[in-house]
Structures are given as structure tokens and as C-alpha cells.
């Protein structure tokens, strides 16, 4: 079990921030790394041509370590929607072909597929929320011969419902379906091994559980899609762009692997250096240990919540880092505001009060939340 890490954050004792699924706070060392990056812009003569590639490759390498893949499979993107659009643009969909999603999925992993279906004459089918809470079984049962794309998360963003991607990935391969994953609500706090799951594309935004800055994430692209079309054509993605003296010797070829899909102006040192500092700490903590530590704490919260008459997704069908609390008569009006007035921060998502602590939370934080809920 990882001991409490609150000293790594600028978090006053009277703040109970239980909302990492909304946005993580930045660690001191991450802020310091961002500051060093900003200094390059303050003194641009210190930022050399090779630096345009050095810091992006360092981030790419750390991202590869996090998901057990070669850095050549990693593209640097500004958002989950950017990466998902690359996937939608490059995956084939036949007329009448089916794209599977789950009910109440986050919209960034819905809109690209709706547009794809319109353009190709296919259709999006939504898997309804299962009565027993077993999303894995529901997805596996829904896959058919004409299912061509599965666009899914690992964690339902509203209540933490769990999807077993290893099982789902095998089913997708068996029927020849492409697997596209948005892991923004799980990567960095739940182990993910790209070599086992074998998705076609996987994207993550870095400002939640990766504990990095806003507007920076990464996209995993399976080797079979490395010759695909990028979302934009920028100068750094082309072959030979390291040689600034020959940039007007225009190239048809691209940088190796998934680098062709990198966003423009990826070489923002403040973003890259701070994001790399965050990934370095996650790797040091070990994602599996983070998951176990948070899982043990959240199991206790779930037990207390159920004792109050609140509903929580069954522990074996819920991601360990995520809790969605349901009220028998609906969420009390103004609950989030009531909590915030006492410096207790959660999110309301659909019919759930979303409670998502991290290693910086203490027993006192949890006790304060539960006391307010008891009074209600």
C-alpha cells in the first residue's frame, strides 16, 4: 500500500478534493518542470533546434513504458477527441456496418462515430446499461458479425462501471472488429498493457489520472495503421524535419511509426516537461500499486455508503479508483454546492455523485464527506 502523498501537492488541510476524475491537481515537481519549460520561452536562445524533438521523444518514451509498448506506437495529441478523430478517419466502415458504443458514454467518443456512420452509410448501436451492472457481458453479447468497430472506455465515466478490455479485445479480434479505446478515466490508475489488449487505437487525455497539464495526451496506434492519414499536415511530422536548413526540401515521407499523427506545435517544453514529470512519478509509484491502494480505500467508502442506504456499483463490477453514489430519491438539490461550501469537492454526473479520491486524500477527507452525506 502506498503511503499518503499529500506533501507532493499544494493542498490545504481544510480542502477535501475527491474529484480527480474531473481534473487532477498538479504535483510540486510537475509545476516546477512546467516552470523550467516556460523559461525556454523567456530565454528562447536557450531552446535549440534539437530541443524541438528531445522533450517530445522523452514524453513519448514514458508513455510507451506506461502501457508496455514501443514509443514508435505513440502519437502526441492535444485531446482525446483529436485522437479519436484520427481513428475514425482511418478505420474502414462498410455500408450497413455497425459501430458499438455503450449507453451514456462520454460524448468525445460518440460524435466522431456518429459522423463516420453518416458518411459511410453505417450505423451506431448503443448497448443499454445492463440491469446487473456487468458491462463486459453486455458488450460481449452485443458483438455481431457485422460489428466493425467497438468504441469503448475501460471505466464508465459517470459511476465507475468496469469493462474487462482483455476479454472484449479477444472477442473483437475473433470477429474482425476494430477496437478503439478512450482511457481518459482509467489510464494512470489502472494497469493497461497494450500487448495484451491489442487495441487498434487507444487515446488518453493527460489532465485527469495522468496528473499532467491540460491539452496534452497521447494516442496509441497499432502498427497496421501506421501508414494512415494524419489529422493535420505539419512540418515536424515529415521525414527529415530535424534538419532546419532543409525544411523547404519538401518531403512526401513521414517520421517513423505513429509520429505522423502528432499534433502541430507539439514541442511546447512547459507541457512536455511537466507531463513527463507526472508520468515519471506514476511509474515510480507503480500503477498496479496505485490501483490497489485506492481500491482498498474506496471499498471502505462504498461499504459506508451502502450502510446509509446509498447505491454503489458492485465492487467486482466497478473500477477500483472510482465511486458513483446513487440516492434512493435522487440526488438532493444543491448537494455539490453544499459540499463545496465546506471545501469538499465531488462531481455530479447523471444520477451519480462521483467520488474519485487519489493518493493525496486522507481519512479526514473521507470522514468529512461521509458526515455531510449522513446529515442529508
Image (cartoon, rainbow, N blue to C red):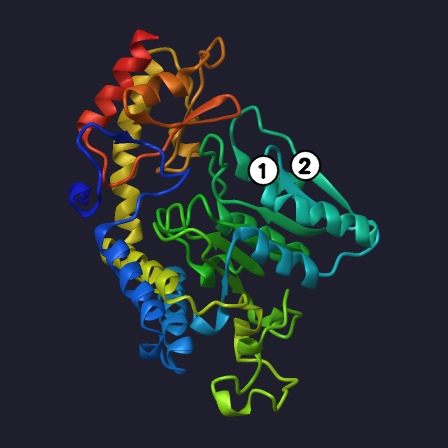
**Which of these two is toward me, 41 or 34?**
41
Residue 117 at x, y percent in the picture: 77, 49
Marker disc for residue 243 = none
Residue 247 at x, y percent in the picture: 56, 87
Quadrant holding the N terminus: top left
Q: Residue at x 58, y 61 (%)?
A: 200
- Mark 1 secondary-structure assignment: loop
Q: Can residue 239 be seen?
A: yes
- Which quarter of the picture shows residue 347? top left
Residue 77 at x, y percent in the picture: 51, 61
- Mark 2 secondary-structure assignment: strand
Please tell me which of labels 1 and 2 falls first in the chain.
1
Quickly name the residue at label 2. 126
- Which quarter of the picture shows residue 293? top left
Q: Residue at x 15, y 44 (%)?
A: 7
Q: What's the distance in space between the residues labelled 1 and 2, CA to CA?
A: 9 Å
State yes or no: discs 1 and 2 in contact (Cβ < 8 Å): yes
Quickly name the residue at label 1. 105
Q: Residues within 10 Å of mark 1 (few under 14, many from 20)?
A: some
Look at the picture and state if 70 lies above or below 108. below
Residue 36 at x, y percent in the picture: 27, 65
Q: Residue at x 57, y 77 (%)?
A: 235
Q: Is residue 195 left or right of residue 302?
A: right
**Which of these two is toward me, 143 or 194?**
194
Q: Residue at x 18, y 41 (%)?
A: 6
Amino acid at each position: 500500500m502506498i503511503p499518503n502523498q499529500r506533501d507532493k501537492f499544494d493542498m490545504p488541510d481544510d480542502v477535501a478534493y475527491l474529484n480527480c476524475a474531473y481534473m487532477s491537481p498538479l504535483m510540486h515537481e510537475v509545476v516546477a518542470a512546467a516552470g523550467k519549460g516556460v523559461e525556454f520561452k523567456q530565454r528562447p536562445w536557450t531552446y535549440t533546434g534539437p530541443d524541438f524533438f528531445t522533450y517530445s521523444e522523452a514524453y513519448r518514451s514514458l508513455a510507451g513504458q506506461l502501457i508496455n509498448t514501443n514509443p514508435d506506437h505513440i502519437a502526441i495529441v492535444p485531446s482525446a477527441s483529436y485522437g479519436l478523430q484520427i481513428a475514425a478517419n482511418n478505420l474502414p466502415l462498410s455500408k450497413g456496418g455497425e459501430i458499438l458504443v455503450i449507453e451514456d458514454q462520454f460524448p468525445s467518443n460518440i460524435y466522431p462515430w456518429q459522423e463516420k456512420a453518416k458518411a459511410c452509410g453505417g450505423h451506431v448501436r448503443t448497448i443499454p446499461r445492463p440491469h446487473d451492472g456487468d458491462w463486459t457481458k453486455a458488450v460481449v453479447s452485443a458483438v455481431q458479425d457485422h460489428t466493425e468497430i467497438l468504441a469503448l472506455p475501460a471505466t464508465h465515466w459517470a459511476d465507475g462501471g468496469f469493462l474487462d478490455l482483455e476479454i472484449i479485445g479477444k472477442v473483437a479480434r475473433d470477429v474482425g472488429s476494430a477496437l478503439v479505446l478512450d482511457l481518459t478515466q482509467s489510464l494512470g490508475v489502472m494497469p493497461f498493457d497494450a500487448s495484451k489488449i491489442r487495441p487498434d487505437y487507444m487515446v488518453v487525455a493527460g489532465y485527469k489520472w495522468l496528473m499532467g497539464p491540460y491539452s496534452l495526451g497521447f494516442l496509441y496506434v497499432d502498427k497496421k495503421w501506421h501508414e494512415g492519414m494524419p489529422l493535420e499536415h505539419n512540418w515536424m511530422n515529415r521525414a527529415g524535419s530535424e534538419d532546419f536548413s532543409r525544411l523547404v526540401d519538401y518531403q512526401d515521407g513521414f517520421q517513423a511509426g505513429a509520429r505522423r499523427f502528432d499534433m502541430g506545435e507539439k514541442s511546447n517544453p512547459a507541457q512536455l516537461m511537466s507531463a513527463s514529470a507526472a508520468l515519471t512519478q506514476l511509474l515510480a509509484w507503480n500503477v498496479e500499486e496505485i490501483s490497489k491502494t485506492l481500491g482498498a480505500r474506496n471499498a471502505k467508502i462504498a461499504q459506508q455508503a451502502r450502510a446509509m442506504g446509498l447505491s454503489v456499483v458492485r465492487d467486482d463490477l466497478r473500477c477500483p479508483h472510482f465511486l458513483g453514489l446513487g440516492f434512493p430519491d435522487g440526488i438532493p438539490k444543491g448537494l455539490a454546492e453544499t459540499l463545496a461550501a465546506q471545501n469538499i469537492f465531488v462531481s455530479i454526473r447523471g444520477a451519480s455523485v462521483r467520488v474519485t479520491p487519489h493518493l493525496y486524500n486522507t481519512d479526514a477527507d473521507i470522514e468529512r464527506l461521509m458526515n455531510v452525506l449522513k446529515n442529508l
